[in-house]
Image: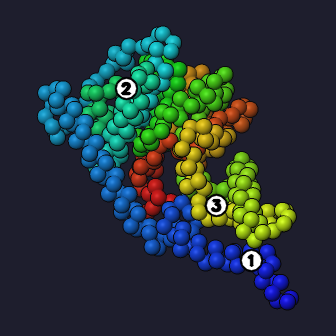
Amino acid sequence: MRLSAIFRSFCFRFLILIVLTLLLAPICFRDLLYSPLFSRQLNLRRLSREFLQKSLQDGSNALQHFHQIVSTSSTVLPNTSVPCVHRAAGSLRPSRVRGTTSLVVTIITTRRRSEYHYLLQVARGFLDRMSECGQDCSTFQILICNVDSFPEGHSDACLLSHLLPMVSRHWTEHVGEAPNRFEQEKQDYAFCLSRTLEVYNPEYVLLVEDDAVPLNDIFNAFFHLVRVRFLQEPLGGGLYVKFYHPERLQGYINPEPMRILEWVGLGGLAGLVLTWVYTLTLRQQQFSWWVFVAFTVYAMMLAELAGRHYLLELRRISPALYNVVPVTECCTPAMLFSEASARRTLSYLKEIVCEPGYAKDIALYQELWRRGEWAWALEPNMVTHVGMFSTLRGSFEGEEPQLL
């Protein structure tokens, strides 16, 4: 009788559940790239190869797409080199009427690995998203900001200059030489933000790097932010809204306290459901807090093992489910500014000197806290970071580019 009672006890059944989970989870989650149980040995080489092949194909398709458009609208022959359309500083007519342009998507670009055509992938992505958006996006603009040290040598930017407005930061515009690449990147960022405000005077600026391909719901997210979440004040008074955070840093076990609260809340909700199922299945008469706590901890463990990234993806069901949380310091592939916050950011950047270990994302984040301000991050990500070559470091970003 005593042994039978042990087998029927919750502790014994829960122990069996834990053991089965620990045995099966590595098998079930080993193919999930952003799970802690992802098997590098089995999958990393294959996924890296597929990732690079897809990027290569997408870049080739984008190149063919834009060459075809340019060749049909000009005397340029398909698949030949295209000269840049040069614009003097005042050739782009500024918009003096506030609100004429509600959003400018400014793509900061410099030469990278030419065969992947990152800039063309990003530009095509935004043009497609704007086309799908229709009349709601009729006041949107796309600006190419070419910060290459030799702008005429950036062939992809030159190709797009026949279709989209482009500004270039020529060497004659530089005041002296930047002391390091980190400071140069900050100056390029400030230049593009400043020229966007000067040319268009928009309500909002989405400053994206040329390896951040937009996802389908990026403009849904924008409208939800400006029309619902931050209706009273642009961006809720924040300096910016970050549209991307590296997937490998999105787990629950991170220093961000809001994620811990989210983790406990998710565990509690799932624990309540599991407790109800357990009670109903075994016809238990009373609700047990110990059973609820045990299932809550179990659900939290399972969520972390599966990967928070995949749970965030479920939020795409509706913009109302998007998560707006306090920002963290990394990274800057896609940043949304209001007109007022963009001007504040420019003034802050003038006071900052970047250096190795103190890049612009870290500098801006620390400047926020020093001034008692705040910024936001939107989850899930609204862009896919496809770049595998670091212009900042001048080399590959490790042997596992963009995967982990």
- SS for tag 2? strand
Give the CA separation, mark 3 to mark 1. 20 Å
Name the kind of residue labelled 2 in the image: Val
293 or 30, which lies in front? Answer: 293
Q: Earlier in the sequence, mark 2 or mark 3?
A: 2
Q: Position of residue 402 (x, y in %)?
A: 46, 55
Tell me: 6 left or right of 188: right
Q: Position of residue 115 (x, y in %)?
A: 28, 49
Q: Earlier in the sequence, mark 3 or mark 1?
A: 1
Q: Position of residue 220 (x, y in %)?
A: 50, 34
Residue hosting label 1: 13
Other residues around mark 2 within 10 Å, as few (<14) / some (14–19) / many (≥20)? many
- SS for tag 1? helix
Name the kind of residue labelled 3 in the image: Ala
Task: Give the quadrant of residue 300.
Answer: bottom right
Task: Give the quadrant of residue 171.
Answer: top left
**Does residue 184 appear in this view?**
no
Mark number displayed over residue 167 = 2
Circles 3 and 1: CB distance less than 8 Å?
Answer: no
Name the kind of residue labelled 1 in the image: Arg
Mark number displayed over residue 378 = none
